[in-house]
Image (cartoon, helix red, strand yellow):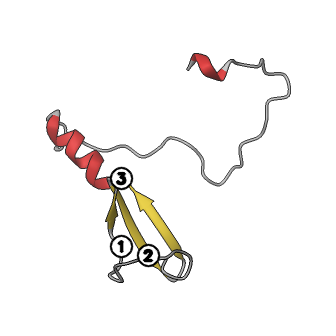
Amino acid sequence: MKDKFQMSSMVELTYFLGLQVKQNKDGIFISQDKYVAEILRKFGLSEGKSASTPIDAERPLVKDSDGEYVDVHTY
């Protein structure tokens, strides 16, 4: 990041504005794992079983040409 932005501290950025930041040769990855863990703990769900996302990651999503338009502001 120091190549792209002026920075005053030259230590590696790991946490910023509630976001976890991981940097490696492949890029910069931002996540909210710590926030999610805190929410789960707050509501007593940290011991629950996780579930994988039920979507086939190998098949690309395609536009439904017969589908109806939806007002995205409703949601």
- Disc 3 marks a residue whose amino acid type is Gln
Q: Are marks 3 and 2 in contact (CB under 8 Å)?
A: no
In the rendering, which numbered label is found on residue 32? 3
| Element type at mark 1 | loop
Residue 39 image position (x, y, % from top left): 23, 40
Residue 48 image position (x, y, % from top left): 21, 40
| Element type at mark 3 | loop
Report the number of numbered marks.
3
Viewer-side label of 1, 3:
1
Q: Which residue lies under the disc numbered 1?
A: 13
Q: Residue at x 44, y 75 (%)?
A: 23
Q: Which quarter of the image is occupied by the C terminus?
A: top right
Which one is nearer the viewer's eye here, 60 or 20? 20
Q: Are marks 1 and 2 in contact (CB under 8 Å)?
A: yes
> Around disc 2, counting alpha carbons within 10 Å, would you say few (fewer than 14), some (14 to 19), or many (20 or more)?
few
Q: State left or right for residue 12 relative to residue 65.
A: left
Residue 37 image position (x, y, % from top left): 23, 48
Which one is nearer the viewer's eye here, 30 or 1? 1
Q: Residue at x 16, y 42 (%)?
A: 41
